[in-house]
Image (cartoon, helix red, strand yellow):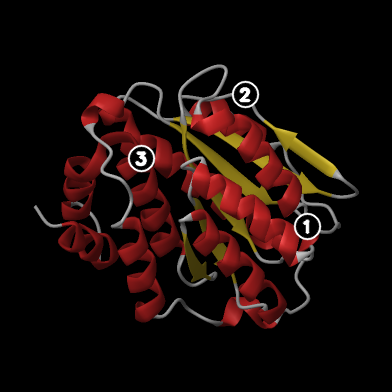
């Protein structure tokens, strides 16, 4: 729940996009042998301030599935929080048509952020030393939100634990709420992930960057380079940084 409505006015600068792409370029080199069982948590703030962009988020997650299907697929779990302490997770889904009905059934509700609860869930999902009791290793956590209303020390500790478990957090901040920016950026940096802003004027950019993270988690650099050839300048910048 954002404290500022000016958030949607600003567009991601090229420097911020470059910084995000540079961070993704430093990820460990996933390979095609890792394709079976690639897992990703897709987490959304569903508090009232995000109601205007919820439908767009639904379309974006569908694109992530589409881009990874030819690589052997991606298992995605939807996480969202809203209202008075409501936090829900979906089963692991391999297709967009499995996850889409779950997203469209969610309605945003007033409440405060529950990012600490989300990070605890990611830590538990990763398992001790990054080895889950069931299923494949968790490759990454993607979080889309606009606010951060919790004690920063606890969030920093959780982000550091995720880094040790090999689970980077990729934070996409809607708007520029200044109270949120420092906290969300720190989560990304301390986990070994990356932060990038977006707004209502740049849904295609968000879709492509999210899909790039998913493609890289599943198919590694060769898959990402192929993805870059089929998409815009932002993803091509990423593939150029990765090199041959």
Q: Position of residue 87 (x, y in %)?
A: 78, 40
x 53%, y 82%: residue = 10
| Residue located at (74% from left, 51% from top) | 116
Sequence-earlier tag: 1 or 2: 2
Extreme residue in the right direction? 84
Asked which quadrant contains residue 150, the reply is: bottom right
Q: CA distance from mark 2 to mark 3?
A: 19 Å
SS at circle 3:
helix
* Residue beneath disc 3: 217
Residue 24, above or below 31: below
Q: Earlier in the sequence, mark 3 or mark 1?
A: 1
Q: Is residue 137 above or below residue 237?
A: above
User: Relative to residue 100, is residue 208 drawn left or right?
Assistant: left
Q: Which residue is mark 1?
A: 113
Q: Are marks 2 and 3 in contact (CB under 8 Å)?
A: no
Name the residue that disc number 2 marks.
91
Callout 2: SS: loop
Of marks 2 and 3, which one's residue comes earlier in the chain? Answer: 2
Taking depth in this image into account, of 91 and 115 the one nearest to the observer is 115
Residue 80 located left or right of residue 112: left
């Amino acid at each position: 729940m954002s404290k500022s409505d000016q958030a949607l006015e600003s567009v991601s600068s090229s420097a911020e996009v470059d910084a995000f792409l540079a961070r993704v370029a430093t990820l460990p080199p996933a390979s095609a042998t890792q394709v079976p069982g690639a897992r990703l948590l897709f987490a959304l703030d569903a508090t009232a301030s995000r109601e205007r962009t919820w439908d767009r988020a639904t379309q974006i997650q569908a694109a992530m599935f589409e881009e990874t299907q030819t690589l052997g697929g991606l298992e995605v779990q939807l996480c969202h929080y809203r209202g008075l302490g409501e936090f829900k997770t979906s089963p692991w889904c391999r297709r967009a048509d499995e996850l889409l009905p779950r997203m469209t059934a969610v309605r945003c509700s007033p409440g405060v952020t529950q990012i600490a609860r989300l990070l605890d869930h990611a830590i538990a999902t990763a398992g001790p030393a990054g080895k889950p009791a069931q299923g494949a290793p968790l490759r990454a956590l993607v979080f889309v939100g606009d606010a951060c209303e919790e004690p920063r020390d606890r969030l920093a500790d959780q982000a550091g634990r995720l880094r040790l478990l090999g689970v980077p957090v990729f934070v996409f901040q809607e708007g520029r709420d200044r109270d949120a920016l420092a906290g969300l950026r720190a989560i990304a940096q301390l986990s070994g992930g990356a932060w990038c802003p977006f707004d209502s004027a740049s849904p295609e950019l968000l879709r492509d960057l999210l899909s790039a993270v998913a493609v890289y988690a599943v198919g590694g650099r060769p898959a990402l380079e192929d993805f870059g050839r089929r998409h815009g300048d932002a993803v091509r910048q990423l593939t150029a940084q990765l090199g041959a």
